[in-house]
Amino acid sequence: MPLIFSPYFCFMGKNIVVIGGGIIGLSSAYYLQKAGHRVTVLDKSDFMDNCSYGNCGYVCPSHFIPLATPGIVRQGLKWMLNSQSPFYVQPRLSRSLIDWGLKFMKSATPEHVEHSALPLKDIAVLSQYEYENTWRPLPHFEFAYEHKGLLEIFQTQAAAEHAHHTVEKAHAIGLTDTQLLDQKALQEKEPHTRVNGLGAIFFRCDAHLYPNKLMHGLLDLLRSAGVELLPNREVLRFETGNGSVKKLITSQEAFEADAIVVATGSWSREMAALLDTRLPLVPGRGYSVTLEDSPYRVNYPAILVEGRAAITPMDGNKIRFGGTMEITSTHTPPRYARVQGILNAVKRFFPDFDVTMPPREKIWYGYRPCSADGLPYIGRIKRYNNVVVATGHSMLGLSLGAGTGKVVSELVDEKPTSIDLSPFAVERFD
């Protein structure tokens, strides 16, 4: 049955302000409006330049291993002098970076990976369910969604051994349609081009979509439902009293609110500080290149393990290549040599692909909000009773977008949440 938005219920609900116009903020606005609230979304820009547009479009329960893993710090140190490396931390004197780095190193343990797998899987499965059963049936909202699986291709014996353990773990947490492919079975999955790999994990549970269509369609949906979308509204401060936030002040006007959702992505640490809350989070810059009317063809999205890159067929005739995690300031100029590193990795795995370095205006880059342990921050803060935070999703913002929006709405309405949110507690490092 098509979803019908009712202005009557909007009038009877709370007045809610969502700060942030990326997938997390817009998804939260969707579920809050659906629950009968009057919703305003403020974006510091024009809703068009956040990292929700340029990612590889995965909706991926397979990504149950957090960014903070054993060995990642050592590997990052080795890559620091390589301009094309896929993981890089820009050295700089920054108290927030040092604080984040110390917490990140402390979190990068086998125990943390073990404890993170089930929470990450649960929110990803919830999100995928919402994309498929709530969003896809909506009229006039098409975002090139395909649930056909994802390949994680490896080239070395060490990665093959790790893949074996990953498949065992996937089965243990309920992703039983995960299988290990040998070289022959991998090539059979991609009959249109040569694949240079020893084998792959095939995650049948995964899906993908075209982020650009999703975001534009979601904006249109919210406008038609009466959600107020206000661009170029950077929140400068809050007026508080009696344990709650009363007003949000921008450079242009003030907004009263019964409840506030902070979904400001890589700028969330600064926003949380305005609310007297400490949020260990740094921006992680990624890059992507999209071929329109691609001369190459692949059946499945793929992670290129040793290349630390990703590839996705999109919207019928497009292929997107993406990757890198560059921990840096949002003011640091892009390092385009890293894009060449992505394209070199693609060539090593798909030798028939001759993708030249595009002009800079054809290269996308954006900032993912990276928490200090690889898990998002989703929940209320202690100091104010009407503030919900939803950020820190790192590379999984789009994948977890629909599920996060749903639990944000449940939190605002003080209902039991669809999943256990305790692993994602906002102030878990205090």
Image (cartoon, rainbow, N blue to C red):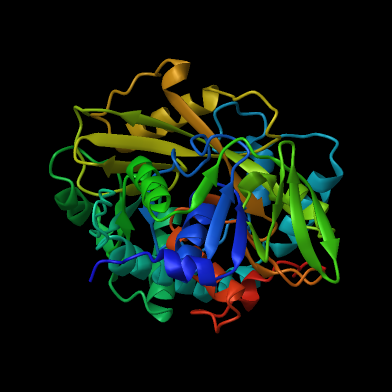
Residue 185 image-quadrant placement: bottom left
Q: State the residue at coordinates (53%, 39%).
A: 50
Residue 94 image-quadrant placement: top right
Give how far across and how far down residue 187 sits, in percent: 19, 48
Give how far across and how far down residue 386 sits, in percent: 71, 69
Image position of 334 with respect to 403: above or below: above
Residue 378 image-quadrant placement: bottom right
Count of numbered tags: 0
Give how far across and how far down residue 420 sits, in percent: 56, 80
Q: State the residue at coordinates (40%, 63%).
A: 62
Direction from residue 77 to residue 34 in the image, left or right: left
Direction from residue 296 to residue 327 in the image, left or right: right
Q: Nearer the viewer, residue 245 or 263?
A: 245
In the rendered image, the quadrant that contains the N terminus is bottom left
Direction from residue 65 to residue 329 in the image, left or right: right
Give how far across and how far down residue 357 sits, in percent: 40, 19
Which residue is situated farthest in the top direction here?
A: 359
Q: Nearer the viewer, residue 284 or 157?
A: 284
Q: State the residue at coordinates (80%, 53%).
A: 238
Direction from residue 85 to residue 52 in the image, left or right: left
In the rendered image, the quadrant that contains the C terminus is bottom right
